[in-house]
């Protein structure tokens, strides 16, 4: 299948040139080393798809907030936990693998010594695990401000 994209350069492999105005509109199957301005353009918020979580949250004080972050032992969940902790949020990392979760928590606390980060076991595919997590969290007496 062909894909239509906007590019700011002609240095791409194309099948058919659809328009010859700038920026160039190409119908193509494969792109080689081209900078696509469409994905770098900032939106009304001032951020783009290449903006980082640190950039987006700059200047936000999350002190006094508590967040539960699911899937926090890897990927976007661990980065979300790190940035929330950086902004002062008390982060509850909800993880299936406690060892992996503790490793991420330790890395966050090493980078951000004042971080308030806890790990709790949660397997969203198990209703018993969800009930235990909810009961344990409720008994902690903490408010829940963010659930991610």
Image (cartoon, rainbow, N blue to C red):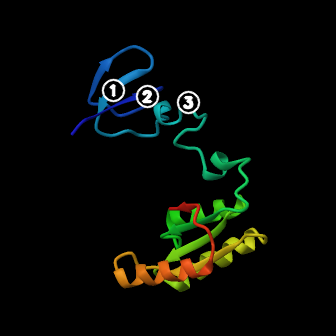
Report the mark closest to the observer, 3 or 2: 3
Say which residue label 2 marks.
Answer: 7
Proximity of marks 1 and 2: CB atoms separated by less than 8 Å? yes
Say which residue label 1 marks.
Answer: 26
Q: Earlier along the polypeptide chain: callout 3 or callout 1?
A: 1
Q: Quadrant of residue 124?
A: bottom left
Image point (68%, 63%), residue name: 89
Image point (66%, 47%), residue name: 55
Q: Where is residue 80 in the image (x, y as percent from the top left)?
A: 58, 61
Q: Residue furthest right?
A: 114
In front here: 75 or 22? 75
Proximity of marks 3 and 1: CB atoms separated by less than 8 Å? no
Q: Earlier along the polypeptide chain: callout 1 or callout 2?
A: 2
Report the mark closest to the observer, 3 or 1: 3
Q: Distance between the residues labelled 1 and 2?
A: 8 Å
Q: Position of residue 132 (x, y in %)?
A: 45, 84
Query: Which SS class for mark 2?
Result: strand
Q: In which quarter of the image is the N terminus?
A: top left
Q: Is residue 112 above or below residue 31?
A: below
Q: Callout 1: 10 Å neighbours few (<14), some, many (20+)?
A: many
Say which residue label 3 marks.
Answer: 44
In front here: 76 or 59? 59
In front here: 31 or 128? 128
Q: In which quarter of the image is residue 2?
A: top left
Q: Where is residue 31 in the image (x, y as percent from the top left)?
A: 38, 38
């Amino acid at each position: 299948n062909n894909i239509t994209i906007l590019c700011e350069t002609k240095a791409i492999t194309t099948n058919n040139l659809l328009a010859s105005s700038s920026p160039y509109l190409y119908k193509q199957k494969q792109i080689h080393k081209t900078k696509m301005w469409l994905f770098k353009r900032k939106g009304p918020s001032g951020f783009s798809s290449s903006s980082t979580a640190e950039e987006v949250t700059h200047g936000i004080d999350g002190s006094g907030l508590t967040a539960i972050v699911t899937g926090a032992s890897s990927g976007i969940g661990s980065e979300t936990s790190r940035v929330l902790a950086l902004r002062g949020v008390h982060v509850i990392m909800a993880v299936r693998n406690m060892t992996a979760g503790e490793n991420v928590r330790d890395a966050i606390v090493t980078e951000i010594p004042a971080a308030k980060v806890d790990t709790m076991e949660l397997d969203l595919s198990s209703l018993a695990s969800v009930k235990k997590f909810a009961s344990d969290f409720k008994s902690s007496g903490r408010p829940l401000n963010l659930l991610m």
